[in-house]
Every structure is written in structure tokens, then in C-alpha cells.
Image (tube, helix red, strand yellow):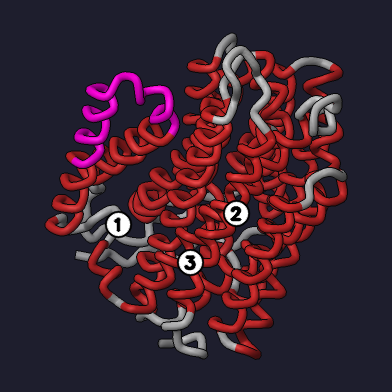
Amino acid sequence: MTTTHAPAPPIGKAAVGALGALAVSTGALESVVTPTLPLLQRELDMSPAEGALLSIVLLVTGALITPIAGKLGDRYGGKRVVVRLMGVVCAGGLVSALAPNLPVLLLGQVLQGAMVGALPLSFILVRAHLPAGESKVAIGVVSGLFVGGAMAGTLAAGPVAEGLSRHWMFALPTFAVIGATVLVHRLMPHDPPRRTDGAGIDWPGLVLLSGTLVTLMLVLGLGADLVAQPLVLLGLVVLLAAFGTGWVAVERRAASPMVDLRMLTRPAVGKSCVLTFLICVGTSAATYLVPQLFAVPADTYGFGASATEIGFFLLPGALAASLAGPISGIGVRRLGSRAVVTAGVLLMAVGLLGLAAAHTEIWHLVVGKALVALANGLCVTAMVTRTATSVDLGDTGIATGLVLVTRVIGFAVGVQVTGAILTAGTPSGSKIPAESAFVAGFVLAAAVTALSLLVVRTMSKGVKE
């Protein structure tokens, strides 16, 4: 039974500003690992595969938290859930700041992953407290501030880590998140729960999906090291199959599943998920390999770039990604989703093959990374738009949630595979992968991206199918 509640009280600019400050600070905290990953690998003596795991664990946690956060927000109110999630994020930031080794740092990143679920709840809060026209503007502002915070984190992480220490790289944005959370708590009025229909949280589905993703990451990340221990590797594969099979069985029977797998039988949704997975596998190669290549010593085939320089070199890619959303939206409206996705896939394949063929100058990597980031934004935005407009209004959240979860899984798989390629391509006694390992990673990613054209051909030309 659904209960109707009184509308939420209106809010002023100060409350929206508090949400904006939260978006800036969380964006900065989320982005500090990417430009400093080579530095973290050196200081914590990580292999490329372990570095790959560190770079994705926050996103994997976010994929698990986001659907649960939405249901908790419906049940208890968005503000209450946002504040508590940010408490978890702050704890994770402090754990990351104090981490003496990789396991503790991984724990901190797992806790920080709660921020991924908090951002959509911020949008729900804005919609609950503002008229439709004003809420669209406010959502755009908060989204833009999150991107701006991510860019600031990318640029600042290196100087802070090198000038102070890696500990302060996590601590400073965490302090900003704490301050912004206090502002949200004080300035944002409580919003009433939106429904109490008795639908419970799919805890079994959450546990099984968590087990599936964690085991998958272990198989991909440690597979090369476990070839000499076939029984251990076989055990992990069997465990992965058990978790995956159990999760599918639970989700198909659950009254309120965490992920409604029946939605995948709809052609528009199923194709969007397949495309998103393949495209994000390709994107992840550039995201992971380019910073690693920047950091390879200059006396070999790399550039010996510092964390500060890597952050600066990655900025054009971040700018390209921020422009991709609006460009994709305009393209879908005028040309249709298939045309935009086709252009994005071709652009990404060209960028990845270009990185494989030419990576002897810094500008080669900067341009290649920017092309891949732009292409990824074009494709994923078009996929989300296409999915959202091809299902009933009441199914929009479920369908787009499937695409976004698939995005995270594709990115995680791609990063782990490329990390494993670098690990396997590192000569015994050396910490520097062979140049051919980077080439293999870029070529494999380009091949996977090109495969997505087979799916694109079956799409309808318009947004709706």
C-alpha cells in the first residue's frame, strides 16, 4: 500500500549551494587515485594488477550501493540517507588517508564508494524541494560542480601527494566533504518519504552480486599469477559460477529485485547493456594504461612523468568527457541514437589504435586519451537516453540503472584485464612492463570496441525502438 505524504518544503539558494559544495568535494575525492596511481604503486609496492584493482574498487562499490540508496531514500527520505552515506564516505576518506598498506587503502576505497549512491539522491532532493523548471537548472548546476570537482582533484592530487604526502591527498578533500555534509545537514530541510509500499530491500541479491563482482575481480586480477596453482584458479572460477548462478536465480524470483533482469529481454535495454559493456571495456584501457605509460621511466620508452604532470596531461581528457554529454544529447535529438553511437565507436577505435601505433610523444597520449574520453561520453549518454525513452515512465529508473551497472562492470573488467596484461608482460626481476604489453592492451581494447559495431547495426535509427 502506497502512502501519500505532504509535499517537501521549498529550499533557497543556500541549500542548493550546500549540495553543490558536496558535489565539488566528492568529485575531488573520487578523482585523486587516477593521476597518482603510479605513485601509489611505487610507494605501496603494488603490481599492475593490484593497481588496477585499486582503481576500480570505488566504482564497483558504487554500482552495488546506488540501487539500494534509491530505495532507502524512498523509504526514509533523501536527506537522511544522503547524510548517512556521506558519513560512510568520510570514514572511508580518513581510512584511505591513514592507510599504511594496500589492504587498508582498499577498505577505504570500498567505503568511499558510497558517494556514487549519494549523488543521484542529491538530484532527488532538488526535485523534491523545487519546481520543475528550477530543479532542472539546479540539477545541471550540481552535475557541473561534480565534474568541476573531479577536474580540480585530478590537477591537485599530484602536487599534494608530492609536496606533502599521499596521506594528505585523501585527507584534504575528505575534510571538505565533512564540511559540506554539515552544511547539507543544517541547511537542507527534511523531505518526507515518497512511498511506503512494503517493498523490501533485496539483501540476498546484494550479497550475491557483491560476491560475483569480487570473485570476478580476483579471477581477472590474479589469473596470471595463479596459472601455476590451477586448483586455486579452478576453485575461484567455480565460486564465480556459483555466485553468478545464485544471483540470477534470486533476482528472477525476488518480489522487488535489486536488478530486474527481466528488463534485459527488451531489445532496447538488452542491446544498450551489451553496447555499454563493450564500449566501457575499451574506454578502461585508455583510462588505466595512459597514466601508467606516462610514468614509465624516460630512459626506456616512457616519459618519467610525476603525479603532478600526469594530472595536467589528463586534464584535456576530463574536459572532453564533460563536453560529451551535451554534444551527445544534441546529436541524438537531431540524428538519432544509432548515428551517435556509431560515430562514438569509430572515434574510440581510432583513438585506441592510434595509441597502440604512436605513443612516443606526450601529445600522442594526450590526444588519444581525449578522443577515447569524448567517444565514451558520446556513446554512454546516447545509450542512457535511448534506454530511458524506450521504456515506460515507471520503468525508467530500473532500465537506466541496468545500463549504469553494466557500465561499471565493463569498466572494471577492462581495467582488470589490462592490469593483468601489464603484469604478465613485466619481465622477471623488473618493475617496468615491456612496451609490447601496452600495445597489446590498446589493440585488444580497440578490437573489443570494434565488435560493438555488430550490435550497433541492429539498432533502430531513432531514439525509440
The 10 Å Cα crowd at callout 1, few under 14, some 14 to 19, many 20 or more, is many
Determine the CA span between mark 2 and mark 3.
14 Å
Per the image, the residue denoted by label 3 is 451
Task: Specify start and end residues of the magenta stretch as a single range.
Answer: 221-241
Give amino acid for label 1: Val
Judged by depth in the image, the label closer to the viewer, 2 or 3, is 3
Principal secondary structure, stretch drawn in magenta: helix
- Contact? badges 3 and 1 (CB < 8 Å): no
Above-or-below relation of 25 to 142 = above
| Residue 227 falls inside the magenta stretch | yes
- How far is mark 1 from mark 2, CA to CA? 24 Å
Q: Position of residue 35 (x, y in %)?
A: 73, 35
Q: Which mark is residue 259?
A: 1
Q: Earlier in the sequence, mark 3 or mark 1?
A: 1
The residue pinned by badge 2 equals 283
Q: Secondary structure at mark 1?
A: loop
Q: x and y percent of residue 463 in the render?
A: 50, 85
Circle 3 SS class: helix
Q: Residues within 10 Å of mark 2 (few under 14, many from 20)?
A: many
Q: Are marks 1 and 2 in contact (CB under 8 Å)?
A: no
Residue 86 makes an appearance in the image: no
- Residue furthest to the top in view is 100
Of residues 282 and 200, the one nearer the viewer is 282
Q: Is residue 112 magenta?
A: no
